[in-house]
Image (cartoon, coloured by chain):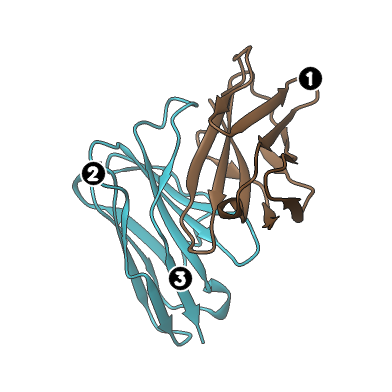
């Protein structure tokens, strides 16, 4: 089966600019996640969707970050305006369902964002 | 709230030897799952192994096994017969029935020496 697709692979922007990331989950996976991974740290959840509804966005900095999941499939994550501390790898993941603790997350290759 | 602690920032192991990566967790839920992921320098997160809180047997997947000690709240990953390709960052993570999200530790950088 095809894995989680993310684009772009790399992005360099200046602070105060905007940027968008795209994710296409594994076919049939109801749950989609966006994680932020700062260099040297573990991934931190930003937002979690079940189909096209938001399950958890408690750690999303909503003054600058936004995300949507169109028709319960693809998702975009946007940052506007970007800050230096947003430099990180943004990982998209999907799983079959959110309601089973044994359902592993499958990750994409990530987008490495550098804000200068 | 869930918390994962990985106390080994870096580990070295000789090729063909076994290595144990430590992980302790903290959750108040009775039903939870524990996961290990591998992240090579290329960046992708690769799922390795899963252990459920009600599983009586320790999980095994090829050269990977999980040493699950429920009373001590530990879920250590054991890699047998290390290979050079095992050099990577390893993350322990947990997921509980109430929290739903996967919470990660800070990771352990494993280096396999020839």
Q: Which residue is mark 1?
A: B71
Asked whether residue A56 is in view, the answer is: yes
Q: A93 above or below A6?
A: above
Residue at image coords 46%, 56%: B44
Q: B57 above or below A87?
A: above
Q: Provide residue B37's location: percent of width, then percent of height.
A: 55, 44
Chain whose colour in the figure is brown: B
Residue at image coords 30%, 36%: A30
Q: Provide residue A31's location: percent of width, then percent of height.
A: 35, 39
> How much space separates mark 1 and mark 3, taking CA atoms?
39 Å
Q: Provide residue A2's location: percent of width, then percent of height.
A: 25, 46
Q: Which residue is mark 3?
A: A112
Locate the N terminus of chain A and report the quarter of the image it occupies.
Answer: top left
Tell me: A93 left or right of B85.
left
Q: A108 above or below B35?
A: below
Nearer the observer, B62 or A94: B62
Chain whose colour in the figure is cyan: A
Q: Secondary structure at mark 1?
A: loop
Tell me: B19 left or right of A45.
right
Report how many numbered discs are placed on residues in the image: 3
Disc 3 chain ID: A
Nearer the observer, B108 or A71: B108
Residue at image coords 54%, 54%: B39
Q: Which residue is mark 2?
A: A72
The quarter of the displayed image where residue A22 is located: bottom left
Q: Nearer the viewer, mark 2 or mark 3?
A: 3
Disc 1 chain ID: B
Disc 2 chain ID: A
């Amino acid at each position: 089966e095809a894995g989680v697709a993310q684009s772009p692979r790399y992005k360099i922007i200046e602070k105060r600019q905007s940027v968008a990331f795209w994710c296409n989950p594994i076919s049939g996976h109801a749950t989609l996640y966006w994680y932020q991974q700062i260099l040297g740290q573990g991934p931190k959840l930003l937002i979690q969707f079940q189909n096209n509804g938001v399950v958890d966005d408690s750690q999303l900095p909503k003054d600058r970050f936004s995300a949507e999941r169109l028709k319960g499939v693809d998702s975009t994550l946007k940052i506007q305006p970007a800050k230096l501390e947003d430099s990180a790898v943004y990982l998209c993941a999907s799983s079959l369902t959110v309601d089973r603790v044994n359902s592993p997350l499958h990750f994409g290759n990530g987008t490495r964002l550098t804000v200068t | 709230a869930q918390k994962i602690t990985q106390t080994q920032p870096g580990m070295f192991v000789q090729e063909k030897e076994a290595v144990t990566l430590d992980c302790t967790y903290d959750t108040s839920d009775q039903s939870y799952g524990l996961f290990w992921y591998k992240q090579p320098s290329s960046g992708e997160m690769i799922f390795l192994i899963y252990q459920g809180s009600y599983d009586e047997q320790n999980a095994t997947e090829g050269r990977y096994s999980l040493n699950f000690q429920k009373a001590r709240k530990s879920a250590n990953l054991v890699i047998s017969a290390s290979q050079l390709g095992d050099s990577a960052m390893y993350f322990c993570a947990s997921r509980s029935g109430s929290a739903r999200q996967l919470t990660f530790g800070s990771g352990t950088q494993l280096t396999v020496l020839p």
